[in-house]
Amino acid sequence: MMVASLLLLEFKRPNETYKKKDFPITIINAVIYAFAIFAYAAFDKVLVGIVYSFITTVFSIYLFIKIRENYLKYPVITYTTITYILGTVAAFIVRFVM
């Protein structure tokens, strides 16, 4: 619920100070954080990690679809969506395909 509250807060109050030049740093940070999501979801013996990351991914994608045309005003939603998509997809591949 901590992630959801941040996403909903930003959804209601967009960030006007975030600029396009900040986006590459956001992407790099999202990729690094995705490794943590991946490690938690892919290698946990119980399914709590993968279920949590899947729910967070779906919720962030839902919000991102609503704001996608103005994604620079919503850096937390954009960041979270990138992070959880990368981490969760990689975790699903390792956990259920390999």
Image (cartoon, helix red, strand yellow):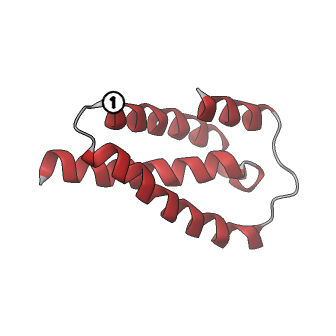
Residue at horizontal 52%, vertical 54%? Answer: 82
Question: Is 1 left or right of 13, judged from the image as shown?
Answer: left
Q: Position of residue 49 (x, y in %)?
A: 35, 36
Residue 25's place in the image compared with 75, above or below, is: below
Counting the numbered discs, the total is 1
Task: Specify the farthest residue to the left.
Answer: 98
Residue at 64% in and 64% down: 26
Q: Give how far across and how far down residue 23 sits, in percent.
A: 68, 67
Instruction: Say above or below: 10 vs 15.
Output: above
Quadrant position of residue 52: top left
Residue in the image at 57% along x and 69% along y: 28
Query: Vertically, is 64 above or below 32?
Result: above
In the image, taking residue 36 as reference, residue 70 lies left or right, namely right
> From this viewpoint, which residue is outermost toward the top?
1
Q: Is residue 38 left or right of residue 33?
A: left
**Residue at horizontal 33 percent and vertical 43 percent from the top:** 41
Location of mark 1 (residue): 48
Splitting the image into 4 quarters, where does residue 19 fall?
bottom right
SS at mark 1 in the image:
helix
Circle 1: residue type? Val
